[in-house]
Amino acid sequence: MKISFCSLGCKVNQYEVTAIINQFLDEGWELVSFDKIKDEKVDVIIINTCSVTDTSDGKSRKMIHRAAKYAPGAILAVMGCYSQLNPAKVASILGVDIVIGTSNRDKLHDMIIDKLNNKDSAVINNTSDIMKEKCYEELKVNHTNDKTRAFVKIQDGCNNFCSYCTIPYARGLVRSRKKEDVIEEIKILTNNGVKEIVLTGIDTGSYGKDFEGYSLANLLEDICVSVDGLGRLRISSIENSEISIDLLNVMKKYQEHFCMHLHIPLQGSSDKVLARMNRKYTISKYLEKIDLIYSMFPDINITTDILTGFCSEDDEDFLNGLEVIKKSRFGEMHVFPYSRRPKTVAYKYEDQVDEATKHQRVLKILELNEKIALDYRKKFIGKDLDVICEVKKDGWWHGHSSNYIEIKFKGDFKSNDLVKVKLIEAKYPESIGEVENEI
């Protein structure tokens, strides 16, 4: 039997679909790349959808239609945020057999097997009210084809309800994973040779908010103490307001494990815009936290998300945002124009920014991104960085340093080797290095 999948969106989606696909691979199924389903017969296709923007919605629909067109005989199962928010729309697409959202993923394997055995033509819609979910749904990834980096999901859901965002409605409220399950999974992955663990979640920094007296800082320390042979530990996107001094102290105490990189979304350009977004900080509080982090970790790479063109953002706000970016000394920015989303508070705001203005602001921020990203990388010219060999192309190895600088270099290595690379030419997005020696 053959199975294929397409996973859109965030690293959490990638983790979840990997856990489901592994169940089939462990039973001897063959995995077929999604871009080959037109030419190679498959029995099952899973589409894991995203709904963070209008573009994500459109891409989700496009991939569902592509699967139905190119593999009409396959069982087509759709899961994820788009199907959670729009189950009836997804179920109405010709060729779809199973619809679930962001819960009941642990039942999808059995649902697919039942569908294969029964050949029932009725569409199974097994979405449920995600706001009623109170417990973390366990999906294990005990092995991965990528030995260089593995994602470990530690929580689901979000309680922030930013005015522009559909994610709480798609993912529900915060549910944290048991520390024992997190640590056990990391132990297995580490024993299997994975050299970098990335802790991820829908709102990673909120881990433990539904527990009594146990936080993300506690989890990080327990991981460092409990996992023999632990390599690099990277924290995925984390909110400024969720970075506690306890968390930073744990990073400092076990600095040999922690990657010197934090992704801390800024989003808004001024206090006025942040308040309209329902973000949990002011510009001054954001900069204060950034300065604290730099004081403890001078070489750290702080990257960010910028959402420009949000309701009421005028030219003064935008220019203020550019100054905040410069003060923050980011190593890289991900820039998005505001996308008006149904079911959100901001959808009803009347002071929308026109699309042409959004586009121009995105271009200006991207231009600034080129400069600040290059400035950050220039600081490391002549310095040695620990880089994991990820992929080899045209005689060059490509990989990321602990502080998330992408570097290409030459040498006689194999995938997953950890090597010390001297950065000799700073470029963005990929710098050039030369190898000193393997670590």
Image: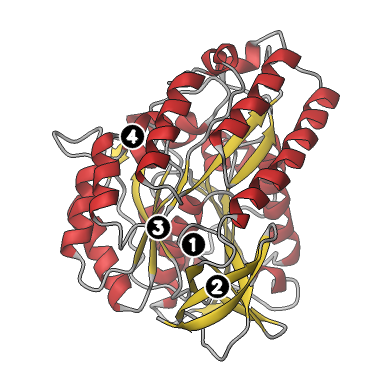
Q: Position of residue 264 (x, y in %)?
A: 48, 38
| Amino acid type, label 2 | Lys
Q: Earlier in the sequence, mark 4 or mark 1?
A: 1
Q: Is 146 in front, or is 175?
A: 146
Specify which label sits upstream in the sequence, 3 or 4: 4
Q: Which residue is mark 2?
A: 422
- For badge 1, the amino acid type reads Lys
Q: Which residue is mark 3?
A: 259
Look at mark 4 in the image and give the residue it sits on.
174
Q: Residue at x 50, y 23 (%)?
A: 162
- Identify the mark nearer the N-term, 3 or 1: 1
Q: Residue furthest right?
A: 356
Nearer to us: label 4 or label 2: 2
Distance from disc 4 to disc 2, alpha carbons, whole Å, reads 42 Å
Residue at 50% x, 33% y is 167
Q: Secondary structure at mark 4?
A: loop
Q: Is residue 429 left or right of residue 280?
A: right
Q: Check disc 2 and report its element: helix, strand or loop.
A: strand
The percent position of residue 191, horizontal first and vertical second, equals 28, 77
Q: Earlier in the sequence, mark 4 or mark 2?
A: 4
